[in-house]
Image (tube, rainbow, N blue to C red):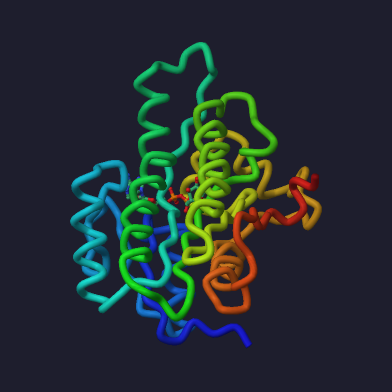
Amino acid sequence: MTTLAGLKAIVTGAGKGIGAGILKRLREGGASAIGFDTQPSDDMMVCDVSDESAVERAVAQSIAKLGGLDVVVNNAGIMLEQPFIHTSAADFDRIIAVNLRGTFLIAREAARHFLSAPRQTPGKIINIASELAHLGRADYAPYCASKGGVISLTRSLAHELAPIVLVNAVAPGPTDTEMLQSERQYHTLKATGDGIALRRLGHPTDIAGAVAFLASSDANFITGSVLDVNGGAAMY
Ligand SMILES: NC(=O)c1ccc[n+]([C@@H]2O[C@H](COP(=O)([O-])OP(=O)(O)OC[C@H]3O[C@@H](n4cnc5c(N)ncnc54)[C@H](O)[C@@H]3O)[C@@H](O)[C@H]2O)c1
């Protein structure tokens, strides 16, 4: 039976949307979990995942507070909808800094901890990618490239850190959060479910369920995988 009892976890970008759903699901399952976000709140540690020293500090503080670490969920992400020819190098760098460098930095600090002492159970790194990493999309080139990078990073780390650390990705499809609500096509997509086999948008709980599975011991023979959670929006 899937259980998260006793696990110690960090979830980035946990202030709202999918990250908030993941944090809630892990806690409801019995894990002790700390959320990171750039937006301060009572329940959140302030940490910009693209800032190396902030990540080093926040991960070390979390490990001290939790009394260890078993799972990190790299969920923090930003998106930009803009024609490619109007995209500046600064726009590109900003997307890559949060979505890919942030994932790299958090994963590295977690891996350093996981490899620093013998473990009874594997440490886990779960990276939130996107179906757009596979599909690509007009007006989203830096975002899609960043998420392709997240999947490639996931596979490389799965090879390098095995068997002590399991590294997997979850690739959500369109999920009803502020990020999706900022897209031009949101209202049409929500009304029609066009292109989604299940004819509805995902909810953060849909993504959180997949993350909870990968965090649990039920997934202890899974590494280097990408779990697609997209209602059938992308089948390949
Ligand atoms: N919503 C979708 O349709 C969808 C689809 C596929 C993938 N995703 C991915 O899921 C993840 C969560 O997306 P969402 O829809 O919940 O987005 P959201 O914009 O609703 O929430 C993102 C959260 O991340 C935080 N954040 C942003 N930059 C940060 C930084 N530098 N450091 C720490 N926290 C930061 C924000 O403050 C916010 O709380 C992202 O990686 C996104 O790319 C979303």
Q: Residue at x 25, y 42 (%)?
A: 51
Occupied quadrant, residue 70: bottom left
Does 221 sit left or right of 33 as displayed?
right
- Left or right of 129? Residue 42 is left
Q: Is residue 142 left or right of residue 105?
A: right
Residue at the extreme top of the image, as rendered = 85
Residue at image point 73% right, 56% down: 231
Q: As drawn, which residue projects farthest toward the front?
A: 118
In this picture, residue 59 sits left or right of residue 173: left
Q: Quadrant of the N terminus?
A: bottom right
Task: Tell me the residue at 74%/48% (across/down).
Answer: 233
**Tally of marks:** 0
At horizontal 56% and vertical 52% (from top left) the residue drawn is 159
* In the foreground, 13 or 204: 13
Residue 24 image offset from top left, x and y in percent = 43, 73
As displayed, is residue 124 above or below residue 132?
A: below
- Is 11 above or below relative to 150? below
Residue 123, horizontal then vertical, whole percent: 44, 68
Q: Quadrant of residue 115?
A: bottom left
